[in-house]
């Protein structure tokens, strides 16, 4: 039998954690024959709630679940972890300035990055979900000089899946027949969901994009503002779909993307598509042999160039702000 893979989840007692942990333990993320050991990181006030989640995990009698550890110490949580899902973050409180938000999250993601650097498994793969996800990933990475930069990713798969869903509705086709959309830039309102290279039930996305009013006034804002629409409808933020996207992200990373299909991941730019090197920005990627490979050579028209540049500019502003706070050492 295989030895269990250690999966660390931060913010494990939160709503995304609650939607995610049971599916990880069931084998949905790493495969139906791979045992997992879960490591739950929480803040002290939420440890009791995390214990409750662990009770329910036990009560689910998952044959693949080797055990659950709970701690408020990142150095224990990430010990031996091959997958680190950084979900816990501080939400923006009323009246909080952006600088304050970046600062409190820097205080979370800096030490977590350092702990990952020091105690995680050599093959550790990190997915940052907690917002501002791209910049939090950049902060964690800056504190982990011994971990290859390409192991630090931020989640834009939820935006990617939302784009697939909206295209399927537009085309009246099942979502399984839509592929190769791309989310570019930041996981924020400036993100650019690009359909120009998509395959929409056998038709080129560029054909749908000819209806520019639909593209810019309906499709793009619907995808970019879907999170707010869900808060408005549900009274609380998207959690199950975010958990699902995180599982998709890691599964594709470890097991590979289907032939002929790419997905979207925010990762430190290798300098492609004019995105400054090191900036954690979303790109089209395939996964081969457990590594993300950028899909290079996609041509961009004026609209795409402008939209990508705007989102990248926002990321550069966030980077400048955290740099000024001393959160990007090295
Ligand atoms: P939540 O508030 O229900 O749970 C967050 C949990 O994180 C809480 O249990 C809290 O105690 C914990 N936490 C806070 N600081 C921590 C620390 N330093 N270490 C460990 N745990 C800590 O929030 P929810 O709904 O689970 O969302 C989590 C994050 O995911 C938020 O930042 C949210 O904005 C983000 N998000 C990102 C999405 C994406 O697509 N990238 C989609 C949806 C949400």
Image: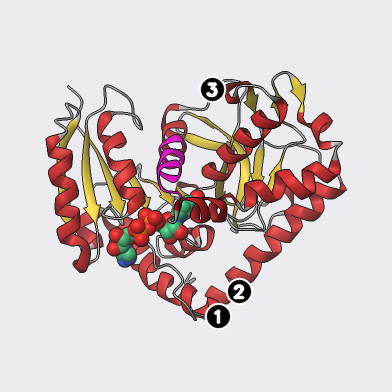
Locate residue 239, reporting x and y percent. 41, 48
Locate residue 312, reporting x and y percent. 68, 59
Instruction: Mark 1 or mark 3: name the one nearer the start of the chain.
Output: 3
Task: State yes or no: discs 1 and 3 in contact (Cβ < 8 Å).
Answer: no
The residues bearing labels 1 and 3 have C-alpha atoms spaced at a distance of: 41 Å
Q: Which residue is mark 2?
A: 320
Tell me which corner region of the image, top left, top right, bottom left or bottom right, holds residue 124: top left
The scheme the figure's colours follow is: secondary structure
Mark 2, residues whose alpha carbon is within 10 Å: few (<14), some, or many (≥20)?
few
Ligand 1 within 8 Å of disc 1? The answer is no
The residues bearing labels 1 and 2 have C-alpha atoms spaced at a distance of: 6 Å
Instruction: Mark 3 or mark 2: name the one nearer the start of the chain.
Output: 3
Asked if residue 320 lies left or right of residue 69, the reply is: right
Locate residue 225, reporting x and y percent. 61, 53
Considering depth in this image, is 313 or 229 the residue closer to the camera? 229
Mark 1, residues whose alpha carbon is within 10 Å: few (<14), some, or many (≥20)?
few
Residue 268 in sight in this render: yes
Task: State yes or no: discs 1 and 2 in contact (Cβ < 8 Å).
Answer: yes
- Image point 60% across, 31% down: which residue? 262
Asked if residue 271 lies left or right of residue 327, the reply is: right
Locate residue 33, reporting x and y percent. 26, 22
The residues bearing labels 3 and 2 have C-alpha atoms spaced at a distance of: 37 Å
Considering depth in this image, is 125 or 310 the residue closer to the camera? 310
Q: Which residue is mark 1?
A: 324
Q: Which residue is mark 3?
A: 258
Q: Would you say residue 164 sits in the magenta stretch?
A: no
- Image point 23% across, 52% down: which residue? 40
Name the quarter showing ligand 1. bottom left
User: Where does the N terminus fall, quadrant-wise?
Assistant: top left
Looking at the rendered structure, the secondary structure element under dot 3 is loop
- Image point 18% across, 29% down: which residue? 62
């Amino acid at each position: 039998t295989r030895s269990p893979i250690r999966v660390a989840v931060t913010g494990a007692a939160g709503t995304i954690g609650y939607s995610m942990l049971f599916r990880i333990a069931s084998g949905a993320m790493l495969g139906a024959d791979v045992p997992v050991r879960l490591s739950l990181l929480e803040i002290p006030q939420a440890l009791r709630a995390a214990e409750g989640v662990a009770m329910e995990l036990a009560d689910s009698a998952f044959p693949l679940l080797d055990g659950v550890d709970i701690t408020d110490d990142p150095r224990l949580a990430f010990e031996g972890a091959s997958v680190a899902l950084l979900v816990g973050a501080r939400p923006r409180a009323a009246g909080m300035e952006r600088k304050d938000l970046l600062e409190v999250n820097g205080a979370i993601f800096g030490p977590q990055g350092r702990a990952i650097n020091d105690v995680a498994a050599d093959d550790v793969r990190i997915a940052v979900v907690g917002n501002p996800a791209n910049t939090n990933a950049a902060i964690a990475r800056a504190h982990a000089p011994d971990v290859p930069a390409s192991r630090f990713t931020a989640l834009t798969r939820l935006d990617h899946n939302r784009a697939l869903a909206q295209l399927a509705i537009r085309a009246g086709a099942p979502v399984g027949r839509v592929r190769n959309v791309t989310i570019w830039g930041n996981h924020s309102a400036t993100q650019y969901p690009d359909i120009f290279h998509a395959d929409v039930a056998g038709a080129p996305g560029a054909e749908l994009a000819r209806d520019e009013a639909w593209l810019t006034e309906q499709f793009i804002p619907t995808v970019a503002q879907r999170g707010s629409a869900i808060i408005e409808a549900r009274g609380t933020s998207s959690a199950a779909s975010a958990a699902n996207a995180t599982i998709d992200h890691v599964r594709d990373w470890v097991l590979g993307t289907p032939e002929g299909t790419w997905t979207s991941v925010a990762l430190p730019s290798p300098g492609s598509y004019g995105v400054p090197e090191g900036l954690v920005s979303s790109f089209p990627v395939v996964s081969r042999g457990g590594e993300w490979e950028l899909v290079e050579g996609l041509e961009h028209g004026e609209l795409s160039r402008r939209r990508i540049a705007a989102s990248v500019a926002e990321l550069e502003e966030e980077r400048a702000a955290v740099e000024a706070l001393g959160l990007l050492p090295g």
